[in-house]
Amino acid sequence: MQLAMGASAANKFIHYFVSDRNSALFGPIRKKRERSRELELINTSACDGKPLPACPAALAHILKSSFYQVSFKRAVHLYIYIYTHIGSTHAACRIRKQFVPRAPEFRNGYSCVPVALSEGLDIRLETAVRSVRYSTDGVEVYTSPANAVPSSETTCHKCDAVLVTLPLGVLKAEHPQSKVTFTPPLPDWKAQAIQRLGFGNLNKVVLCFDKIFWDPTSNLFGHVGSTTASRGELFLFWNLYKAPVLLALVAGEAACVMETISDDVIVGRCIHVLKGIFGNQVPQPKESVVTRWRADPWARGSYSFVAVGSSGSDYDLLAAPVSPPASNHSPPGAAAPQPRVFFAGEHTIRNYPATVHGAFLSGLREGGRIADLLCGSPYAAPPSSSASSNSQPQATAASASASAASTT
């Protein structure tokens, strides 16, 4: 992972983590600042505000050095977790902020978004897609009740094209309850991109209290686990605006481990962490909600990320439509078959992955693509007669990448 740190980021690292409220954990940083060659490298090399290529090596040296106390290493871990978590979201949204100065507010929660978007549509709830068969004649989608045996009570839906919004986790994992079979199988370039791109796990623990006992002016505060394996455990607490509610995040290995534990144990762990920060006066929550996205067969995780061996081009490959194989009886020089299977979701949009608006925009993108294909577009380029239906599309930075949203 490349970590670019400008001057403002370096200063944020120094000043935020040595604030008075964190002095118990991060106090040693202040004493060692003048003695730290690596920290000096981070601070001085970033003065021009340019990305710092040497920063990952410097941070790695800090974490391995026996010179630093455990508390310092934990501070670096917390910086990496919190700053990269928030920074990646801000970076993905920064361009659109130039055009949308004020973000929309959902007063009744995110649930009002799908309710509004689904108005007037024929949506089959509790219905699972079992297989998708596509050919030059069209598409057949086979469904059955979600709680039924996959091989029984199937219903066939015939259409000209299908838009697949399955989460990347469902496309990657062959869970018996949510597995979808494509006939013919997806081409190698599509299947390989699905396996290369990562699909992470981020769970939330919502804690509702009778009153606020934390600093209401702070948007968030962090916590560092005692071991590397546990550093994703409750690493960030969000303060919900003007409400006695905290939202804790659990990521990585810790998120998978927590999915095997009961809600009561998880809430108890949250209270233990909060008491370590605010003291024993922390009350018990009156209500709590715990998510388990990896265990959900219809999600199999939270959202995509660029894994080792993957790249941003895989988002483009996931966004590309798939055509049925050309028939052996097609005349030489015939045009490539019309695309039949289209893909949308957060893992299909290169500029806004892992976001709700990214999934929404990818749906608009594919809706326009399908409309142009079936209804015709005066601006569409004529199809190439030499293109192969199974050839890998050219992935460009300008095209929106692939990722899946959710099943219904």
Image: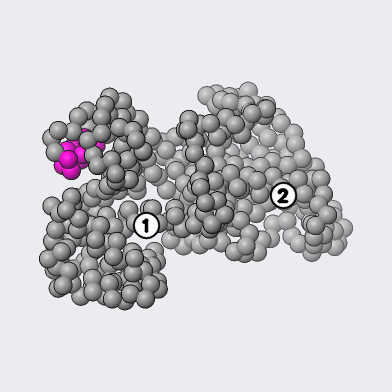
Res 317 visible: no
Relative to 352, is 252 on the left or the right? left
Q: Does the magenta stretch include residue 190?
A: no
Q: Which amino acid does label 1 sit on?
A: Thr
Mark number displayed over residue 84? 1
The dominant secondary structure in magenta is helix
Cα–Cα gap, marks 1 and 2: 34 Å
Quarter of the image with the C terminus in it: top right
Neighbour tally class for label 2: few under 14, some 14-19, many 20 plus, Cα within 10 Å: some
Asked whether 63 or 43 is in front, the reply is 43
Q: What residue type is labelled 2?
A: Arg
Q: How many marks?
A: 2
Quarter of the image with the N terminus in it: bottom left
Q: In the structure shown, which secondary structural element does the residue marked by tag 2 occupy?
A: helix
Give coordinates of residue 180: x percent, y percent. 58, 38
Neighbour tally class for label 1: few under 14, some 14-19, many 20 plus, Cα within 10 Å: some
Give coordinates of residue 372: x percent, y percent. 77, 49
Which one is earlier in the sequence, the residue at label 1 or at label 2?
A: 1
The boundaries of the magenta stretch are 269-278
Q: Residue at x 79, y 45 (%)?
A: 374
Mark number displayed over residue 369? 2
Give coordinates of residue 62: x percent, y percent. 22, 67
Q: Reply above or below: 54 against 190.
A: below
Give coordinates of residue 43: x percent, y percent. 27, 72
Relative to 241, is 167 on the left or the right? right
Q: Residue at x 73, y 42 (%)?
A: 161
Q: Reply above or below: 214 against 191.
A: above
Q: Which residue is drawn at 23% across and 74% down?
A: 40
Q: In which quarter of the image is residue 271?
A: top left
Res 373 visible: yes
